[in-house]
Image (cartoon, rainbow, N blue to C red):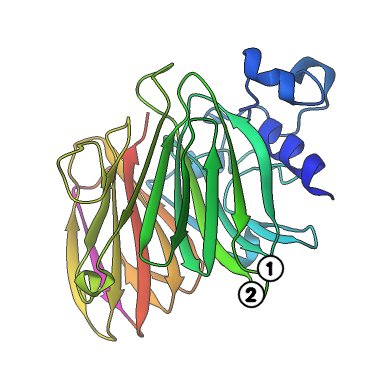
Amino acid sequence: MNRKDFLRKGLLGAGLLATSSLATDTQASPEKLDIVGFNHLPNPNSATNMTNTVLHKAETRGFANHGWLQANHSFSFANYYNPDRMNFGVLRVLNDDTVAAGMGFGKHPHDNMEIITIPLEGDLEHKDSMGNVGVIQHGDVQVMSAGTGIFHSEMNKNRDKHVKLLQIWVFPNKRNVEPRYGQITLDVTQRHNKLQQILSPNAEDEGVWIHQDAWFHMGALDKDFQTTYNLKKKGNGVYAFVVKGDVTIANQALNSRDGFGIWDVDSLDIKADSEAEILLMEIPMA
C-alpha cells in the first residue's frame, strides 16, 4: 500500500478523518469511502469486559508491511479490525512503527485527538500547519492536541537508517480546542530503576501535558528490581506496554512488546524478570 492510501485508510480506520474544511486536502469524504473499523467506541459485548484485565501478546497484534513502513497495531487501525480491540478506555491507538530511511507520513489531517509520539530509535522530523518544525529522537516526547483541526507530516530525517517510534492516540476530555504542539527532551537516566513521568494533565508537571486525566511513565529497570505504581485518579485504568525485556505486572508475566490492561485497582506491583523497559499509561476508562 502506498503512503497516500495508507494515510487515508489509517485515518478513516480510526474514525478521525477531518470533516471540516480541512477535509478538502483528502481524496474523498468519509461517506464515500469503505470505512474499516470506524466504530471506535467501547464494545459492550467484548470478552475483554468480563474481567478487570486484558492481555495483548505481541504476536497477536495487527501487522502491516507497506514496504516503507512496518506497523504493529495494538488496537484496530487501518486494515486491522478486531471488535475486541477498539480501544482501552480513552486509549484509542498504540502503533509500534518502523519507518524506512528517508520515508514517512506525508501531510494529513487530524482533529479532536491527543497524539503522543515517543521515538525509540533514529530521528523523526515533524512539520505542521501551525508552522512548527522539529526533530525528535530517543529521549524526546512529542504531543499534539489536534482540536479543531491540523495537518502535519512525519518523516524519517535520515537517508541511511530507519526510525522506530510509538504513536499513541488518546480521546480528549475537551473537544474543539485550539490546536497545540509541544516537544520536550527528558533525561533518560532519571528512569533507571524508577518510573519517570513523561505526560500528565498539568502543564506545570514533569513531561508533556494533554487534555485528559492521564499520566504516562517510563521505566528502565534492572533485573529483579521491584516497585509499585499507585494510580493517580480513582476510576482510571492502566495499560502497560513492554518496550523490551520481561516483567511481571500485577502477577501477569509479560514479554517484549506485550500489552496488558488492568482496571478497578488502586496500585500495581511491578517486577523486572530481566533488564527491561516499560511504558505505563494511566487513563480514564470512560
Give whichever of 199, 134 is nearer the camera: 134
Q: Measuring from the top left, give residue 67's x and y in whole percent.
A: 80, 63
Q: Identify the residue under disc 1.
A: 101
Mark yes or no: residue 27 visible. Answer: yes
* Dot 2: element: loop
Q: Earlier in the sequence, mark 2 or mark 1?
A: 1
Residue 161's disc number: 2
Give whichever of 235, 112 is nearer the camera: 112
Magenta stretch, residue numbers: 266-272
Q: Measuring from the top left, give residue 90's x and y in whole percent.
A: 42, 34
Q: Is residue 159 found inside the magenta-colored segment of the image?
A: no
Residue at point 54%, 58% (across, down): 124
Give whichever of 181, 194 is nearer the camera: 181
Q: Is residue 246 above or below residue 147?
A: below
Residue at point 69%, 35% (across, down): 13
Q: Is residue 84 above or below residue 167?
A: above
SS majority, magenta: strand
Q: Is residue 234 above or below residue 119?
A: above
Callout 2 amino acid: Lys
Q: CA distance from mark 2 to mark 1?
A: 5 Å
Callout 1 amino acid: Ala
Q: Are marks 2 and 1 in contact (CB under 8 Å)?
A: yes
Q: Measuring from the top left, give residue 139's x and y in whole percent.
A: 36, 65
* Dot 1: element: loop
Mark yes or no: residue 57 visible. Answer: no
